[in-house]
Amino acid sequence: MAAQAPSAPRKLFREEAQTGAINCPACGGPIELHGFGAVEQVNCPYCGSELAPEDSGELELLQAAQRARRSSALPLHARGSFPGEQGKPEEFEIIGIMWRECRVDGVVYPWQEFLLYNPYIGYRYLMFTMTDGSWAIGQTLDGAPRLETGFGHRKVTFAKDKYKHFQTSVAIVSYVEGEFPWQVKVGDQAVAHDFIKPPLSMSIEEAATEDGQDVNFTRMRHIEGAEVWKAFKLPGKPPRTSGVAMLQPNPYKKGRAITWVLLAVMLVAWLVAAIAYVDGRTNKVVFAETNKTVSDTISEEVEIGKKGEMTTLEFDLRATGLSNAWAYTEVMLISQESENAIGFGATAEEWHGVSGGESWREGDQTPSVTVGKVPGGKYLLQITPSAGQQGSAANTPPPNLKLSYSLKENVVLGRYIALPFVIIFGFPILFWLLGRVYEGRRWANSDYVSTSN
């Protein structure tokens, strides 16, 4: 049996040359119908009159109007392609434009809604928020989200996604042009409850009708203005954005999973390096003396490290017998070869008393001083102590004061361990903080100004 010849692909829209114009019965302006039999109402783009299509193909005048045509961000009957559920481009035409606004604390916030239509796919909604320049695209839902109970933010769940309540406002229609599959006119109002999970939102709109109340559920998704301009092949650039839009994705949350994986890898690497660093330190004691008095001045030759290499020294002072007193040691290391001197000091102190009925105590009786990059070689070590106590003449040491000294080389520097650790954790914490600030800016425009999540 011979193979059947493939049929020609169906056209999504009628050819431009086959689209006939119908004159508006109110102003005589030419109107082209693109919504086929689904259209219930047509609003003349020239005068704003409300019209209804008749079976004869003519337009019936429902309500005459006279208003100036507004220039929207996108023109009526423009066609654009957007990725569909399967990722393939789907072409839509703008058949209706509606301007809406809400008033909060005396300030009017307007936005534009574009009704997109494809006869084989259905309707989509493209929204442009004029106050911040953001865009969103979406469609009505067949089902209804489930309202969650609990404290704090109200939440709704749909398709396993949980949305937090952002704001409730009264949306008022301020301008209409084009074709719509429902009755709409300037002044129509609806109570809009917006729930968000950026870049997605769930809008629940309640509007009073003759039969009671009409409820619609719409899910929207944030889309960049550049994507809109590309979809409609428009010249120039889209309107500039400002602030943080309701559905704008948080840039500091992108790649969060990868960030935590990298953090775990870096922590393992840091732990291995820290263990290797600590194991490589000898902490060798090159000088030690105990139970010295303030009158005991020390001058002794010591050998530090290896000649031609740098090492790190740690000098430890331990003072016993301090009571509201202090002890200070001045340390000098004089190179036997170059006669260059390295000097530093260490102070031990102990203070206590009673203030306001509360006893207090402060001070450090075992201070340590670390000196890095000390050239190896022979040195003359000089230690000169001094001390004093409260209520006595200057430099009068406590009677039971005993001093102990220790000088070690090739010691562990804590900053070499702590600094990488701080840096490793610093970046995730910084991004977390920036993300919180970003969310705070978003929620500053909501009904929950005091919170950021």
Image (cartoon, helix red, strand yellow):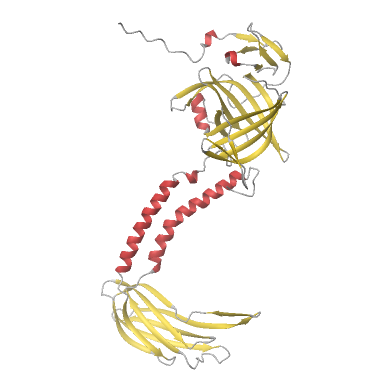
Q: Nearer the viewer, residue 430 or 394?
A: 430
Locate residue 55: give its quadrant.
top right
Residue 4 placement (x, y as % from top left): 35, 8
Q: Nearer the viewer, residue 22 or 193?
A: 193
The quarter of the rendered structure image containing the N terminus is top left
Residue 76 placement (x, y as % from top left): 59, 20
Q: Confirm whether residue 158 shows in the render.
A: yes
Residue 238 placement (x, y as % from top left): 54, 31
Q: Is residue 153 left or right of residue 403?
A: right
Q: Residue at x 44, y 79 (%)?
A: 367
Q: Is residue 108 left or right of residue 76?
A: right
Residue found at the very far left of the displayed protein: 307
Q: Residue at x 52, y 52 (%)?
A: 433
Locate residue 27: give its quadrant.
top right
Residue 405 placement (x, y as % from top left): 39, 84
Q: Nearer the viewer, residue 228 or 291?
A: 291
Q: Nearer the viewer, residue 330 or 449?
A: 449
Q: Residue at x 48, y 85 (%)?
A: 327
In the rendered image, the vertical position of residue 144 relative to residue 389, given as above or below: above
Q: Is residue 149 left or right of residue 285?
A: right
In the rendered image, the vertical position of residue 135 relative to residue 155, given as above or below: above
In the rendered image, the vertical position of residue 177 relative to residue 414, given as above or below: above
Q: Residue at x 59, y 27 (%)?
A: 73
Q: Confirm whether residue 188 shows in the render.
A: no
